[in-house]
Image (cartoon, grey):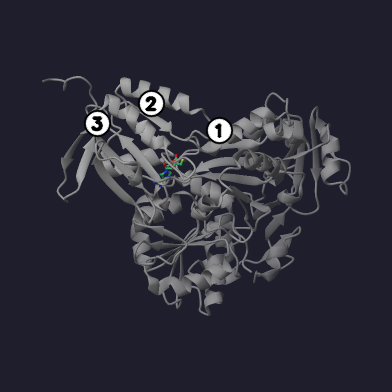
């Protein structure tokens, strides 16, 4: 199995011809998804409609890209975003038939390592052009996970000295260099120094820090990041060797602590212990008693780089996400990123399936549509144990969906662990808006959104609200208009609407919007009968000003003007 990269790569194909090679590369990176051009490579895991925009978005999100197409296409496509500041993920072009692997960008992100991995899986050679890499078989400036390079500019000079024929010696433990073909010599002037001590590099030295230092701290320090820096400095430990922060679980939701971790560029983990020294002893009992350079701070150095996942536990995360109506193009990028990081995914089976594909390591918890509160509580239990949990809704999670159920479960609970979970609600395109967009702008002015389901509210309140909304001449959007167990409610609702609106009032019916079976119908209130509607339909009823006109393709546009009364300026 290949080295695990921080984010799973995206394998991008343009046509079916590349799918076989793409699947072979996917075996190497089981977490990678294959993105295929819509209608050309529909058997891919994800489909996209615009190659350029997709590639640039992946690049800007720092996702490693393996593009199965001509190198030139990739270069031209990414050229516009190359000069922007920010991280540079590995980008490779691979010949459709797997005969060539060309690393293009991301030298410091490990592109050559990936190129070699892919080439060896495809039984070909990687087109490596980086001199240092060719000569030494490794990129000295890109040490493996758990190690940090001291200074990139000094490093470049060091490598060019080495390329000009100088010898080198290695001080400290650098297990990954054992494989490299370095011109080693114990007497060499050039030295690669691996260690956690804070020191100025001497002229002929490449400093690499093992990230083996653990700092435990109290959450009430006024400037936590500053205090950590001072404590390390006073202990003569390099800041680059900091591997992880540790705090008490009572501090899990303390924003100052998370700001400090972000400033320092490390993760923060949590334990049950109370004092910083006890925290460290609890998670790494085999270490020497920690140093306590300042009040509220303890520092310990481990013999190896820290494996953050093994230290205490993470703050759990719970995201309630909206998938949008169905098509993946209508899903916001933040939701896609959340699905990619999830350990557990909960929801109604249809929606969970719509949110896929998932990796084998992701646990799916599919439940019936009616078990919302139970699902919400289950989600908190998982997240409170430190996992990254996603609850899926269709459309927007805040519109007749899971977000309110999750908040209700939290509000009812006095479990402090649940309240400390990192909770996010991520929006989606709701069915009313997706349907409206297909028809034009039927909700272009004030409108009223209602669910016609009387499962969780008395029918009288629905009638009352509907009557008042009609009196107010609002356009209407009906969710849950009808179902087998609620057969008469829509008919009754339409009786109320007809008391206020003329039979010519435009009505838009969107069914399975954004899904393969999508249909859109524009009719009138006079024509609207409950038989035309089912539980997968969105019903939009116009106000007195909503109008319809023909479009060139034979269909019709519907819109409600932005103004009310008489048209301004006339
Ligand atoms: N949270 C969802 C709504 C859930 S209520 C959202 O924001 O869209 C379920 C109702 O939404 C269905 O009965 C139907 O009226 C409507 N609906 C959901 N998805 C739809 C789709 N793709 N096409 C048409 N209507 C849809």
Reading the chain from its start, which is encountered first: label 1 or label 3?
1
Q: Which residue is mark 2?
A: 466
- Mark 1 residue element: helix
Label 2 and label 1: CA atoms lie apart by 22 Å
| Ligand 1 location (quadrant) | top left
Question: Going by the image, does 488 lie left or right of 378?
Answer: left
Check whether the beta carbons of the residues at disc 3 and disc 2 lie within 8 A of each other: no
Q: Crowding at label 3, few (<14), some or many (≥20) Cα neighbours within 10 Å?
A: many
Label 3 and label 2: CA atoms lie apart by 19 Å
Q: Which residue is mark 3?
A: 560
Along the viewing direction, whichever of 205 and 10 lies nearer the viewer:
10
Residue 61 lies, in percent from the top left, at 48, 49
Q: Give the residue displayed 29% in from the left and 23% down from the top.
A: 473
Residue 87 lies, in percent from the top left, at 50, 49
Instruction: Say if residue 400 shows up in the picture.
Output: yes
Which numbered tag is attached to residue 404? 1
Which numbered tag is attached to residue 522? none
Label 1 and label 3: CA atoms lie apart by 30 Å
Determine whether 345 is above or below 191 in the image.
above
Q: Give the residue displayed 38% in from the left and 26% down from the top.
A: 466
- Quadrant hosting residue 533: top left
Q: Quadrant of the N terminus?
A: bottom right
Reading the chain from its start, which is encountered first: label 3 or label 2?
2
Q: Residue placed farthest to the bottom in the image? A: 123
């Amino acid at each position: 199995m290949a080295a695990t990269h921080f984010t799973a790569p995206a394998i991008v194909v343009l046509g079916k011809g590349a799918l076989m090679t793409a699947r072979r590369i996917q075996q190497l990176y089981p977490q990678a998804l294959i993105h295929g051009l819509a209608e050309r490579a529909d058997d891919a895991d994800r489909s996209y409609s615009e190659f350029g925009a997709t590639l640039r978005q992946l690049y800007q999100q720092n996702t490693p890209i393996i593009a199965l197409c001509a190198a030139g296409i990739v270069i031209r496509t990414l050229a516009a975003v190359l000069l922007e500041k920010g991280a540079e993920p590995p980008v490779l072009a691979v010949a459709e038939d797997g005969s060539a692997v060309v690393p293009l960008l991301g030298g410091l992100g490990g592109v050559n390592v990936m190129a070699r991995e892919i080439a060896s899986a495809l039984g070909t050679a990687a087109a490596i052009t980086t001199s240092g890499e060719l000569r030494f078989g490794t990129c000295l400036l890109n040490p493996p996970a758990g190690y940090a390079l001291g200074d990139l500019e000094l490093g470049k000079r060091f490598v060019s000295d080495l390329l000009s024929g100088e010898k080198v010696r290695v001080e400290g433990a650098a297990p990954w260099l054992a494989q490299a073909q370095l011109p080693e010599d114990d007497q060499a002037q050039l030295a690669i120094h691996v260690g956690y001590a804070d020191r100025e590099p001497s002229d002929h030295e490449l400093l690499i820090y093992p990230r083996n230092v653990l700092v435990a701290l109290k959450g009430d320090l006024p400037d936590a990041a500053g205090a950590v820096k001072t404590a390390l400095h006073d202990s003569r430990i390099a800041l680059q060797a900091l591997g992880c922060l540790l705090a008490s679980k009572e501090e899990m939701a303390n924003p100052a602590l998370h700001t400090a971790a972000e400033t320092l560029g490390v993760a923060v983990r949590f334990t049950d212990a109370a004092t910083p020294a006890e925290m460290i002893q609890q998670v790494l009992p085999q270490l020497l008693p920690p140093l306590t350079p300042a009040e509220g701070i303890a520092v310990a150095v481990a013999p190896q780089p820290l494996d953050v996942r093994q230290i205490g536990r993470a703050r759990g995360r719970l995201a309630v996400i909206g998938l949008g109506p169905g098509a993946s193009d209508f899903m916001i990028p933040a939701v896609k990123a959340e699905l990619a990081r999830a350990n557990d995914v909960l929801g109604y089976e249809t929606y969970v399936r719509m949110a896929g594909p998932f990796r084998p390591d992701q646990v799916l918890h599919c439940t019936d549509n009616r078990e919302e509160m139970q699902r919400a509580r289950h989600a908190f239990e998982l997240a409170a144990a430190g996992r990254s949990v996603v609850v899926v809704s269709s459309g927007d999670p805040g519109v007749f969906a899971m977000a309110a159920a999750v908040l209700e479960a939290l509000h009812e609970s006095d479990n402090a662990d649940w309240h400390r979970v990192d909770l996010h609600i991520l929006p989606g395109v709701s069915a009313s808006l997706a349907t409206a967009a297909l028809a034009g702008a039927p909700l272009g002015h004030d409108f009223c959104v209602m669910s016609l389901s009387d499962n969780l509210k008395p029918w009288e309140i629905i009638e009352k609200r509907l009557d008042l909304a009609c009196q107010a001449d609002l356009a209407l959007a009906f969710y849950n208009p009808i179902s087998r167990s609620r057969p008469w409610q829509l008919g009754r609702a339409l009786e109320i609407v007809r008391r206020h609106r003329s039979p010519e009032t435009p009505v838009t019916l969107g069914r399975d919007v954004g899904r393969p079976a999508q249909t859109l119908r524009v009719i009138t209130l006079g024509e609207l009968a409950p038989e035309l509607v089912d539980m997968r339909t969105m019903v939009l009823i116009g106000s007195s000003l909503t109008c319809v006109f023909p479009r060139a393709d034979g269909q019709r546009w519907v819109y409600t003007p932005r103004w009310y009364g008489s048209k301004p300026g006339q």
